[in-house]
Structures are given as C-alpha cells and as structure tokens.
Image (cartoon, helix red, strand yellow):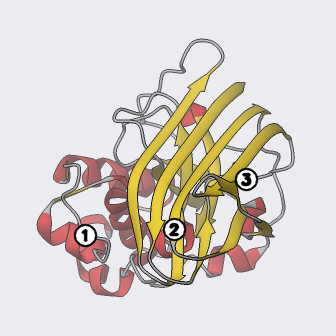
Amino acid sequence: MKRMVNAALDFRVDGPARIVLAVAAARCKGLQIDESMRITRDGDDVDVQEVEDTHDGVLHLFEATPGAYQMRYEATVSGYEEDGDEGTGAQLGNQVPSRYAESDRLFGVAAELFGDLDGVELVLAVRQWVQRRTAYVAGSSRPTDGALDTFLLGNGVCRDFAHLAIAILRARGVPARLIAVYAAGLDPMDFHAVVEVYVEGAWHTVDATGLAPRQSLLRVATGRDAADTSFMTSFGGLVTLDAISVGAVIDGQLPQDNHTGLVRLSR
C-alpha cells in the first residue's frame, strides 16, 4: 500500500518556547518513506532537531522566539510495518492508569459491564460499547478531559473515544495504548487517534469511532494516552494555533472496514 500524507500548521509564539512536533510518519521497519519537513519563522527557515521517540516515532524540536511560524510536512509511504519484539515491558506499562485513561476510576464500571468477557470478545465488546454510548461532536471536549469525563458527558472526539476504550480495557487487565495516525478516508479529515490493544500475542488496532478503515492507517506517535502523542507540545511562551490542515490518501481503492474484527498495522 502507498499512502500520501501531509500536514500544515500556522501558529504564533509570544515568548521564548521549546516546541515539539509529532507529525512525521513513524520510521517503522518495513516502511519506505520519502518525506520533507520545513519550518519557517516570518518566512525564514528554522533550525530543527530530530529526536527519536518510542515505537520508531520521530519528533521535531526547535527553540522558538516570538513570531509567526509555518510548518509544512509531506510524505509518501509504501509498505507495512514489520513486527518487532517490544518485550513484556510494553505490555505492563500500558496496563496501569495514566493521565487521560484513569482505569482505576472506571474499574467498577468495567467489572459490571464486561466482567464475564475476556480476550477478543472483550476487546470488540468494549469498542462497540464506546461507539454506541458516545456521540462524536467536534469541539465538544476540553484538552484536560480524560476517560472519566467522556464517560460522564457521553460525547467527544477521537481521542476521547480512544481514552475511554483504553481505560475500560486496562481496568479489565488488558494492555492498551493510544496511537496517533494519518487516516485515509477519515471525515472530517484531521490527525486521528485509535487504540492499540495487546491480545492473542500481538498488538491489534481498534477504532472506537469507526470513522476510518484501519487498513489505511499510518502510525505517527505511540503512547499511554494523548499526553504522549500530541501533534504539538510547547514549553515556555504562549503558542496560538491559527490554522491546521491534514491530508491522507492512498494509491488505489480505499479498503472497506466494518470494525467487527481485529486488524494489525504490522505484517
């Protein structure tokens, strides 16, 4: 599969700040990536440092001074991820509560609703439950909302769907993590967040929103929750995002996905 992705950010910085961007395709073994990244400040190129992130992710870091910035990223990616041995630590680290996936606070809910299920049956039941009880409403959630907020409010965007599914699965003892992806077929188009869950001896992908075929997904960042996978993180001066544009298409027909089974990003 060949995927063509792009992202554009326009933002302003009002004081000295360290900016970290997670928009590049993860450089997983098995992928062939032809990419370009350019960041400018008031039209002049900015020196950018590449930093390796977990699961082959790539961060772009720079020290910002006050001004108007533009980021442009494009990539053509062929192939599929190859399996890698992440070890037991990757499972254990994604079984405990985290900032946005408070599994300890949803333990009772998970036990009551899914206490008699396990394995694949549990994973698919949780995905379906989250989708049915949560309304997708753009702009409805706050950056500080976690899984418990989504459970109580009953609405959110993709990261909220993912956090709620992750929290419930962890509460039932299943390793689950969030991956930020480019998603061909997503509507409305944006960076997308889905769940990766460890079951039957491998990491599988589920999308609680059901908004994009999983076979088209391209990994960007992998972490416990959105705190580890945000497309932009700033330390220091105030950053104001003026515009964002994300694109993702594939070469050929878009895969069909009814979200009733498990899909792996790796082969």
Q: Amino acid at mark 1?
A: Arg
Residue at figure coordinates x 46%, y 60% from the top left: 11
From what the image shows, is residue 69 above or below residue 206? below
**Quick check: can you spot residue 203?**
no
Q: Where residue 40 sits: x, y (%)?
A: 64, 55
Q: Amino acid at mark 2?
A: Gly
Whichever of callouts 2 and 3 sits on the residue coming sooner in the sequence is 3
Q: Amino acid at mark 3?
A: Ala
Other-residue count near label 2 (Cα within 10 Å), few / some / many at <14 / 14–19 / ≥20 = some
Alpha carbon separation for disc pair 3 and 1 = 27 Å
37 sits to left or right of 125:
right
Q: Secondary structure at mark 2?
A: strand
Which of the labelled discs sits on residue 26, or is there none? Answer: 3
Q: Where residue 35 sits: x, y (%)?
A: 77, 40
Whichever of callouts 3 and 1 sits on the residue coming sooner in the sequence is 3
Farthest residue toward the top?
253
From what the image shows, is residue 181 above or below residue 146? above
Which of the labelled discs sits on residue 142, or is there none? Answer: 1
Other-residue count near label 1 (Cα within 10 Å), few / some / many at <14 / 14–19 / ≥20 = few
Q: Secondary structure at mark 3?
A: loop
Whichever of callouts 1 and 2 sits on the residue coming sooner in the sequence is 2
Residue 53 placement: quadrant: bottom right
129 sits to left or right of 162:
left
Residue 89 placement: quadrant: bottom right
Which of the labelled discs sits on residue 67, or is there none? Answer: 2
